[in-house]
Amino acid sequence: MPEKPRVAVFSNATGAIPPIALPHVRQVEDLGDIGPDDDVVLLYGEVLSPLVHRLRTLLGRTPPVLALTTRLDGDDMLESVRCGAASYMLEGPVPGSVVSGPAGRACLVEALSRTAAGEHCFSFEVAAFLVNDVRGRVSGPPDRYVNLLSPRERQAMDMLARGLTTREVAQGLGTTEKTTRNYLSRIYNKLQVRRQSEAIMIWLGRTPPQTGAEASGLRAS
């Protein structure tokens, strides 16, 4: 695994690119500026599959690409991988995603190095989508979980599973962030999970293991 890969960064986002603690990082304004001397390409922003496709068309191949999205879109993720992206990760506050701070920056550096070495790195939510796609379907949450939630609570979980932030969920529900956080806490209690990532796993059809006591409690509810 190259410890200090040469990284070319292309962004279609309006904000700044994430800080990358590597010595050989350059931001390019045009995908045509990416060449054979670049060990790995970081594509940053939203709707990244057209960028992966264009890069493959320009170079006649898909170089090692890590697509870092600011919002998870299942269709875009699948198309990016089909076009040859080696890694696909989510930037945001969701556990399992690339987050801000020293730990998040270290995670991004490791993912870039592993991608440059020919490996694959996926955020938790991305991996769940991929598994369901390989199965030929997106199974969704089991009925026993769906029936625990009200239609409005199901709407909130649908938004979370699509990668929306708490603020965006609040906007979608027409409530404040504080009210939405309390709302989500009640949902997690109904699903008998402690973390948002576990709730998303359930909603994507990937139910986390439960203890005997937890399973009994769910059956009794």
Image (cartoon, helix red, strand yellow):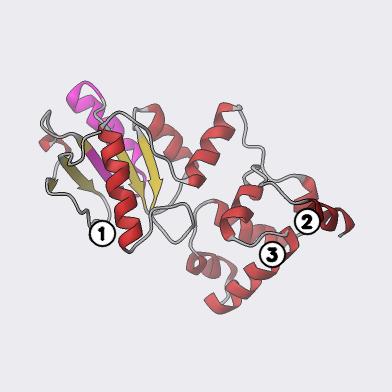
> What is the magenta range?
41-61
- The front one of 160 and 18 is 18
> Is 68 situated above or below 59?
below
- Give how far across and how far down residue 19 sits, in percent: 23, 58
Instruction: Tell me the kind of residue under disc 2.
Output: Glu
| x 42%, y 33%: residue | 79
**Residue 120 placement, left or right of 181:** left
Instruction: Tell me the kind of residue under disc 1.
Output: Thr
- Give how far across and how far down residue 148 sits, in percent: 79, 58
Circle number at residue 195: none
Which residue corresponds to mark 1? Answer: 14
- The front one of 173 and 83 is 83
> Is 141 situated above or below 165?
above
Instruction: Tell me the kind of residue under disc 3.
Output: Ile
Residue 54 in magenta? yes
Which residue corresponds to mark 2? Answer: 214
Q: Residues within 10 Å of mark 1 (few under 14, many from 20)?
A: few
- Regarding mark 2 in the picture, which secondary structure is present there? helix
| x 35%, y 28%: residue | 83
